[in-house]
Image: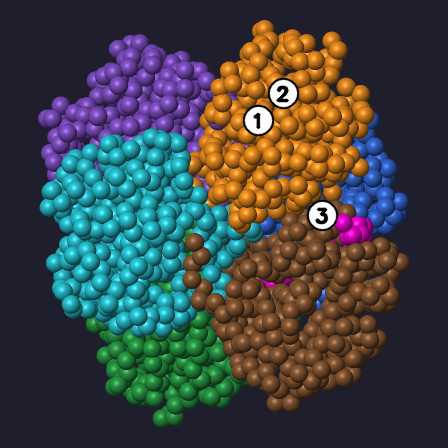
Chain colours: A orange, B blue, C purple, D green, E cyan, F brown
Amino acid sequence: MKRIVTFGEIMMRLNPEGYLRFTQAGKWELSYAGGEANVAASLAQFGLDAAFVTKLPRHEIGQSALNECRRYGVDTSLILRGGERLGLYFVEKGASQRASKVIYDRSGSAIALAKPEEFDWNKIFAGADWFHFTGITPALSDNCAAATMEALRTARSLGITVSCDLNFRKKLWTSEKAGRVMGALMPFVDICIANEEDAADVFGIRAEGADVKGGDVRGETYISVAKQLCDRFNFKKAAITLRGSLSASDNNWSAMLYQGGEAFFAPNYRVHIVDRVGGGDSFGAALIYSQLSGWDNQRSINFAAAASCLKHSIEHDFNLISLDEAEALAAGNASGRVQR
Amino acid sequence: MKRIVTFGEIMMRLNPEGYLRFTQAGKWELSYAGGEANVAASLAQFGLDAAFVTKLPRHEIGQSALNECRRYGVDTSLILRGGERLGLYFVEKGASQRASKVIYDRSGSAIALAKPEEFDWNKIFAGADWFHFTGITPALSDNCAAATMEALRTARSLGITVSCDLNFRKKLWTSEKAGRVMGALMPFVDICIANEEDAADVFGIRAEGADVKGGDVRGETYISVAKQLCDRFNFKKAAITLRGSLSASDNNWSAMLYQGGEAFFAPNYRVHIVDRVGGGDSFGAALIYSQLSGWDNQRSINFAAAASCLKHSIEHDFNLISLDEAEALAAGNASGRVQR
Amino acid sequence: MKRIVTFGEIMMRLNPEGYLRFTQAGKWELSYAGGEANVAASLAQFGLDAAFVTKLPRHEIGQSALNECRRYGVDTSLILRGGERLGLYFVEKGASQRASKVIYDRSGSAIALAKPEEFDWNKIFAGADWFHFTGITPALSDNCAAATMEALRTARSLGITVSCDLNFRKKLWTSEKAGRVMGALMPFVDICIANEEDAADVFGIRAEGADVKGGDVRGETYISVAKQLCDRFNFKKAAITLRGSLSASDNNWSAMLYQGGEAFFAPNYRVHIVDRVGGGDSFGAALIYSQLSGWDNQRSINFAAAASCLKHSIEHDFNLISLDEAEALAAGNASGRVQR
Amino acid sequence: MKRIVTFGEIMMRLNPEGYLRFTQAGKWELSYAGGEANVAASLAQFGLDAAFVTKLPRHEIGQSALNECRRYGVDTSLILRGGERLGLYFVEKGASQRASKVIYDRSGSAIALAKPEEFDWNKIFAGADWFHFTGITPALSDNCAAATMEALRTARSLGITVSCDLNFRKKLWTSEKAGRVMGALMPFVDICIANEEDAADVFGIRAEGADVKGGDVRGETYISVAKQLCDRFNFKKAAITLRGSLSASDNNWSAMLYQGGEAFFAPNYRVHIVDRVGGGDSFGAALIYSQLSGWDNQRSINFAAAASCLKHSIEHDFNLISLDEAEALAAGNASGRVQR
Amino acid sequence: MKRIVTFGEIMMRLNPEGYLRFTQAGKWELSYAGGEANVAASLAQFGLDAAFVTKLPRHEIGQSALNECRRYGVDTSLILRGGERLGLYFVEKGASQRASKVIYDRSGSAIALAKPEEFDWNKIFAGADWFHFTGITPALSDNCAAATMEALRTARSLGITVSCDLNFRKKLWTSEKAGRVMGALMPFVDICIANEEDAADVFGIRAEGADVKGGDVRGETYISVAKQLCDRFNFKKAAITLRGSLSASDNNWSAMLYQGGEAFFAPNYRVHIVDRVGGGDSFGAALIYSQLSGWDNQRSINFAAAASCLKHSIEHDFNLISLDEAEALAAGNASGRVQR
Amino acid sequence: MKRIVTFGEIMMRLNPEGYLRFTQAGKWELSYAGGEANVAASLAQFGLDAAFVTKLPRHEIGQSALNECRRYGVDTSLILRGGERLGLYFVEKGASQRASKVIYDRSGSAIALAKPEEFDWNKIFAGADWFHFTGITPALSDNCAAATMEALRTARSLGITVSCDLNFRKKLWTSEKAGRVMGALMPFVDICIANEEDAADVFGIRAEGADVKGGDVRGETYISVAKQLCDRFNFKKAAITLRGSLSASDNNWSAMLYQGGEAFFAPNYRVHIVDRVGGGDSFGAALIYSQLSGWDNQRSINFAAAASCLKHSIEHDFNLISLDEAEALAAGNASGRVQR
């Protein structure tokens, strides 16, 4: 079985029940999530051996985050314990014209304060085939950025394939700093995942003619983004997700995989949203799965788009979709008929 | 008041709250349902005297199933008590491209193990005007099939009108066995209810040109199914429901009633789904109501389609729609404006 | 800061969880709402000094209603205490073709039985810039009608601007009585808010060519309603809300502001409904806000339509939308993209 | 099977979840209850044919009250429909030194406004062996008092045994009026049920030396109450319940049955309270059951005390205890060991 | 009406439903609380004009904390807005031998990072009669300690009475630092509230012969603690709470008020615990109330002990007990009988 | 780290919220549990390497059972997949005099139908130090009994210590069959765990003078049970749990460990029950832990009694108590004071 390692932060996620606003709710749903943990959880559902690396406080809140990963089959044996707090974030589900809101409260978390030397990457990567991180990890702290760099160097030395989802978070760092730090990490990356905004925010790379606020997905114009990314950083492949936000309740969703001048487009999905947080992570996970499966680019992007389309119908961040379900949708069965 | 008797299984139904997946949920909604119980409950809402015949364990779980029928006005005085277990099934509500899932755990239930001689059909049918069953009942066990045959013979001898919803369940029996057993029961049936898939699965009857997986409802092609059914089994009427599954969240829904070469189509409804389990049963119930009311075929099919359209907006299986509500929709008021 | 006083009834609101019907639910959500309280709450979210005048029983249920206003920033210091009961109403949320239902149980409430002399309007209006009421208040009882008249006379004498939302409730009075009582109050009103049905039910004023049951919003035809209202009662301005009910789940929503022969139309919003009760009140509040802000008519109606569009995405009656959120939508950002 | 008829009011009962106060709760539990409905429901659990007579609004809230009775096996076929509202009451569960609170909102209910001539007692009592009412019913309105008198005259003429639970409600009437009205009804009563406070409040009958506020149950002193009741009204038997309130969480509970100078005491139970509302009603029901079973006085009082002891462990008013469970406790098994 | 100002932190409080452990819960109850906010809320329930001073982030989570204070009648007009985060803490309710657990995550909160000069104490104290703080406030940060000192100097200059609850939090500072900082603040304090452990932890003051871990409350030995406190810091009065922890479910609870060599003891209460967090704060509030009411020392301590006894029966931190309820218990009515 | 293997069934557990009866509840809590899974979960909380062996259906319900084990750190890699159904049981929580109820629906489960040859015990026991089973496993089916025998033979050959909890289930087999089958397994057992009833039901071994129904725990009389067990089957040690059921809410709980004629008694705990299902399993787990830790008999039994005492305060079957918590109670800290 293929083994993947992801590295980053997992947080407590708090959201009011249903469509209640932050200021209304008395009962909240509590789950645990974070970009790289989401990817690991999704890959574990597909049946791979996925390990998540982070640092968690020893107290019961930290333990609960670990337990949630373990519950869904993620290997948690590499997680460091210590530090004071678990980062957290609040999610308010939007509907119709009212946007979803996310409030972060993540500074000073155990992982953000972890020192680079706490991670023994040679041990961590034992048996690993793939390493994945996102732009959030180096944004957490300079220590995390340094640890990521060390991880990348080790991965390179061990011949491990590396993927990165740019995932820009403006609350964590500026575009300027992101560009500088991420720019130094990119040479170690084989496959880059981004959406149009990330590419612009982090590297100033822009496609012409795209209107990401409107509901129209005109993916063709994104080829130039992918091309620029690959050209600048020598990525083997670049994948772009394409979200057309019709409203907080309905989105268009598609994706493109680019390699060597060729672009492979997935079909567009019109999704009725249950919970869209984690949508991008589910795409990254499925793309990794398809690459590790040796599928061709068209099949890869179709699978990744289908799996992440399905994420939008699932509560909380983890994409609890099986291989069969994602493949069935990729094969064209979008009718949603009852499975008995 | 007209009296209807239905015969079959009622199960515990377990579904996670909202759109949570089976593997996520800690709190579940628990209700009680089953094809023939659903029909009885719906008819009781319309104000008829509807009795449900089954066998239930004496313990509190069995009692709860009985109580749920009683709560909604179903006559439960004919229910046998005994046996070990109540069948159950798990429902996971789908959304958008993610299909709903149903997992059955019904083998060995009290009704499946009941012996034909436990049912005294002459007593059961005292005062009854109509008898309804579905293809699920004889599929539960050979005993149930024998009991159904005995019920049909008695109904015929008493001049009671009989309706049957084909309702094929591939987990319960093969198409081959279904065809054989149901084929023997059909001569006692006056009105047959089916969808295209049931007709194909049970009797190998197929309409040309229909694409039930797509979202398009092209009802005209179903006339041939109804005609074949009537021709083969000498049904007085055959009703076909037409579901176009656009996604797990949105369906088209319509229906047709066929008699003597003439087909009567209900309007098509585009439904935004709250819970679609029990949709077919609600159609059957409304059709029985309209027939017992002596309505003409067009009014009958319009009412049945409207009542079952409304079922899709109601949680759990029972179609808790009043006569007034169904008639208002059948009369064309689909605006959903607030009733104060 | 501008100060607004509203006068009317606040009730306990009871609704089943989710889409459960009245007859199904074991757990209910309990909130507190009423036309004029909703307006005050909405204005408090926009940052104004909004006071709500009513009478509430001294017991804990009355106190809870007061607390809910206070929680959201409404000035409750003018509320009288005494009487026996709080009115209440039951809300069943509809979906798709199934309409929402409201059952009122409000007779004999503390406010309905309050005597006109209990309200010292000169004191109540100290510091106030605006007074708002709806057609529900005088409909509660003859005492309430007399108190409203007294309030209006005092407001006029103090130079306070007055707005009224016609809000006809056929369960409370007849069209005939409404026309008579409201007709006497209208000369004191500066700005009238209505929908087409209210204008017809209360004053027999009808627009030609409008079809309020269908899903089509053809606002142009409403100009004649506004013009007739202004002409008959000498209103400075009249605002008309335009709801096109496609289904209980989806509506079109727009509005028009009319002044001196000129009509200003807001864009039409297609809304996917979370909870539409209180939609009209949220419009009134936003219109008052825009008028107090000295905005021109086009900006005013755009803001009012946007704020009330957003209400449809919020559970319960209070429109818990901030100024920023309403302005962003009025400025055209309807994409519902996640705000991080 | 013995048939019992009870007559009175059923209300909507609203209580916050768990131990939340009225002013805290957002989600409430909604059930339906009332003294005489509680008695009917309890008797139905024991397997008798229990019918409840009242009047309920036709709307869904009235229907839900009826459904709740029906669910638990109460014959609801005698219930009149009509009127505007269902009475309701709010229950806040106390704990430790904090007392439970009940707020009533029941005036103007359908049953309170029902006219005596709406009830055809000869029809209602067809097949009945027993009639039960409480002091609440005549307190609802003069109409209800008149209807009760008519019921009693008819019961007497038909030779039906009559029981009455004094159940004084000071919010509904004064002691003076209660004494007068109840005094006129008592000559038709065979078995009187009361606690010490009721006897004092309604008829000014007091036991010496009893301290009902303290935690001590000194039942012997209640004999004089029972004797005075029997002497004044010629009851065949009088039953007295004895509650010692140690705190809102813990009570002592016992009872005595008196006949012809002899007093039969049940053992004292120390109860840890889940929900004590309906405790008295459950006693009355069990006493009726034991009398209809022809049990001797000692067995009767033991059974009634045991059944009502168990009520204190059950949420909401209905005493959902089976015959077996009550008999097991009456036989001395109070260990609460798990039943597998 | 008397006006009280309290100063400190309010946090988000998160607790699993019921008795679920941290690692089990999927749904959590979310409320807002903190020592000084709890005192203000309790005083507002008694009908006083209580203002709470803190600093809260502008986002919706900060707003929700403000709203919760406002909901229960606390004057929030003095609250500063700004900063990044709201502190939070997790509460796991214990039972029987399993202790309750509290995990704090409060560092870096808006109030902890607020600068002393942000608070204009002369303005804040306009109209105030009393100022209350606890040992938590100066422990939050050196800035908070400085702000507290400034508040105390201003209060002294304005002749405002000052109370302080020692409330030692070992996670926030050491005993050594607490002793030093608190020692400097004490000279400005009129009334000191403490339990035995606080006095020992902060000032090294110990009573002989007391065993606070056992279930026995032997209050007499606490007189020496109060005497030492008063002697060292020249307090007018010192109040000591006495908790005897029998288990997580059952406690003894009492208190003593000491003045000029005389000690006044409240009765001991055996409490069955619903939620004991905030118990000490509720005592402080009630003591302030009784002092402001001019009651003698015995009545004061009886009232304070009774009010705080009742807190143990209430979910979450705020002591939502009315004046009447506390006085009834202080007068000796502890029977918990239902109030109708 | 020590490795333990347990073998048996895990079921879905369904219980109504709070104290609702089976017939009342609409929402149920769903968890997964079973005697041997409970032991493994408890040992994983203590930090050991605990593996659970069973067979689970491949569907999502089976997966959820596996996930729940994994979540709490149990090694699930040895679990077989296949078969049709997961057994389930319903738990109704009792209170006061009302007993808890358990209804099983477990026949035909995947594990009950598993064949002995599906288990490769040599592989399963790789690295294991201890094997634990209970009397439930061989009672599930003859296949399971044969598999257990095979497991025991292999364990003996590998020198693995074996413990067995007699755990008689009268719904699964007769005393006669239990005695015969268990009698054949006992020679392979090193440590036997039982309560007095198990010893009597399975082997007809009885202590004189004990009254297990009453609330009194008189452990001394149980020595003869332990002695008889050890004498007959040559156990190294026998542990007896002693439950005194005062009511469904309050129990006495203690235990004894017997070896070579010497008996070691734990203190008695008076427990206020949150959920007592799984209490015995938590005792077995803690005893295994203490034995693997090499503790002497007194420390062992003290720890086992303390850990299982704490189980009674935890919802659902798994004893989610940490080593520290159990040791603190074993060391005498039973005060339940808040841990901050």
Q: Which residue is mark 2?
A: A185
Q: Judging from the image, what secondary structure is the residue with disc 2 in?
A: helix
Q: Subunit of mark 3?
A: F
Q: Which residue is mark 1?
A: A145
Determine if marks 3 and 2 fall on one subunit: no
Q: Which residues are magenta?
A: F77-93
The residue positioned 52% from the left and 68% from the top of the image is F331
Residue C242 versus residue C98 in the image, above or below: above
How many residues crowd mark 1 within 10 Å: few (<14), some (14–19), many (20+)?
A: many
Determine if marks 2 and 1 fall on one subunit: yes
For residue F63, the mark is 3
Q: Return the x and y of residue A178 as percentages of the image width and height.
A: 54, 19
The residue positioned 42% from the left and 58% from the top of the image is F338
Do callouts 2 and 1 mark residues in contact (Cβ within 8 Å)? yes
- As measured in the structure, the alpha-carbon distance from the residue carrying label 2 to the one carrying label 1 is 9 Å
In which quarter of the view is residue A237 placed?
top right
Do callouts 3 and 2 mark residues in contact (Cβ within 8 Å)? no
Residue C226 located within the stretch drawn in magenta: no
Q: Amino acid at mark 1?
A: Ala
